[in-house]
Amino acid sequence: MHVRDLGTHTILASVAFAAALVLTLVAEPDAATSTPRPTLERPSVVETTFKSVDATVAGQWDFPSQTHAPLVVLIPAAGAINRNGLPPGGSEDRGRGVYALLTEELVEHGFAVFRFDKPGTGKSGRGIYATERSNALEAYRRAVEHARVDTGRVFLLGHSYGTDTIAGIYSRYEEIQPPVGVVLVSNRASEVEITRVKAPTLIVVGERDPDDLYKYGKFAFEARESSADAKFETSLVSVPEADHALLVASDTTVGKQYAFDPRVTQAILDWLMNHRSGPVKAGR
């Protein structure tokens, strides 16, 4: 019995010593382990690539500071244009392009933005079979994949023939992720095509060209309003003395810089801010 008791006391003493050692280590941590880890800042710009038929297309997300941000996917005008809104050979200064300048405004107002270089421009490879529609659709597919995007608040924004690229195959975008709103700047979607857009829609046109004002402005607006299944709100903004592209030029130290007319930019921002919480049905 005595030996057995001695063994028990020995074990208890060992356990007590180990517990005291642990307490000492916890009370006096090593200086290296007590140094707080640096907070990793999330990048405001994230680059990516995606396939459009036979072309490898380069694009980027621009993010505001908050996570799960509403997303605007830019669908550019026709022609060889990079993500900034510049043609090949244009300045690579990211702040000088039409779409780069609009992106800055959108990000400042809390929106994430996705834009891309068309095949053969910027960092994108060339493609033989890639089309305006395949580029836009695959850009949209990639844009909504990022974890920092709120997929319940995704907007499509088309410029000039980019508006036709949206309206012409709108159901294909819905199959990927239904947009909660669509902005058609310098609209080129016809009266028939525009009724396919099953989301709240802003139409922005200039008043200088009668086709812009009536065919692609007022008549397109009326077609949506009178459609048998008109369920979604439509807004029309016509800009006095503005031409089709809705751009203005300013002189800078490196030449002319083009941007959207400030009235256009403000109309876009106002509409997006009013719709960022989710879908708005007609009559609301």
Image (cartoon, rainbow, N blue to C red):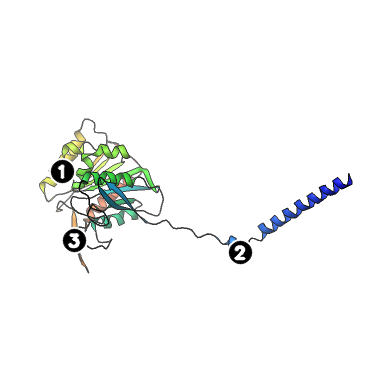
Name the secondary structure under disc 1.
Answer: helix
Q: Position of residue 218 (x, y in %)?
A: 16, 42
Q: Position of residue 70 (x, y in %)?
A: 35, 47
Q: Please name whichever residue, 40 or 69, is drawn nearer the observer in this view of the structure.
A: 40
Amino acid carrying label 1: it is Tyr
Q: Which residue corresponds to the image point at 30% horizontal and 52% vertical from the top-left? A: 59
Q: CA distance from mark 1 to mark 3?
A: 24 Å
Quadrant for the C terminus in the image: top left
> Mark 1 or mark 2, which is nearer the start of the sequence?
2
Dot 1, how many residues are within 10 Å of its Cα: few (below 14), some (14-19), or many (20+)?
many
Asked if residue 60 is positioned above or below residue 180 in the image, the reply reads below
Determine which of the numbered discs, if any, sits on residue 216 in the image: 1
Q: Which residue is mark 2?
A: 31
Name the secondary structure under disc 2.
Answer: helix
Amino acid carrying label 3: it is Ala
Q: Position of residue 261 (x, y in %)?
A: 21, 55
Amino acid carrying label 2: it is Ala
Query: Could you tell me if the residues under marks 2 and 1 are in contact, i.e. CB atoms within 8 Å?
Result: no
Q: Position of residue 103 (x, y in %)?
A: 29, 55
Determine which of the numbered discs, if any, sits on residue 249 in the image: 3
212 left or right, relative to 153: left
